[in-house]
Amino acid sequence: MIFVNGKKEKNYDNLEELINAFNYNKKNIAVLVNDKIVKKEDWKDFKINDNDRIEIVGFVGGG
């Protein structure tokens, strides 16, 4: 089990799989795992472990 934005979720193999499952817009998010930013180019190879705490933060433009 992992935690995504504070909620318990099933585990996924890697960050890219998780992001695709939640239908996030990849261009407008940052991903932190256990309080460390993971670069977009590393999402596919970044393995998720039990009890990881993942925060997905979206950017919103305004004017």
Image (spheres, grey):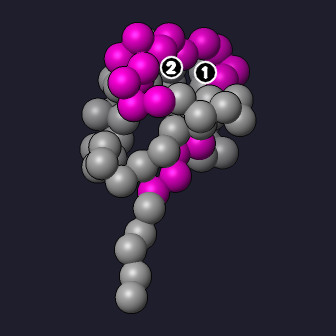
Could you tell me which secondary element the residue under label 1 belongs to? loop
Q: Tell me if label 2 and label 1 are in contact, CB under 8 Å.
A: yes
Indicate whether residue 46 is drawn in magenta: yes
Q: Range of the magenta residues?
A: 39-58
The image position of residue 49, as x and y in percent, is: 60, 12
Residue 25 shows in the view: yes
Of the residues under marks 2 and 1, which one precedes in the sequence? 1
Q: Nearer the viewer, residue 11 or 53?
A: 53
The image quarter in which residue 40 lies: top left
Residue 15, compared with residue 7, is above or below; it is: above
Could you tell me which secondary element the residue under label 2 belongs to? loop
Q: Amino acid at mark 1?
A: Met
The image quarter in which residue 55 lies: top right
Residue 18 shows in the view: no
Residue 7, compared with residue 28, is above or below; it is: above
Q: Which residue is mark 1?
A: 1
Residue 37, compared with residue 41, is above or below; it is: below
Left or right: 37 as drawn, with respect to 19: right
Q: Which residue is mark 2?
A: 11
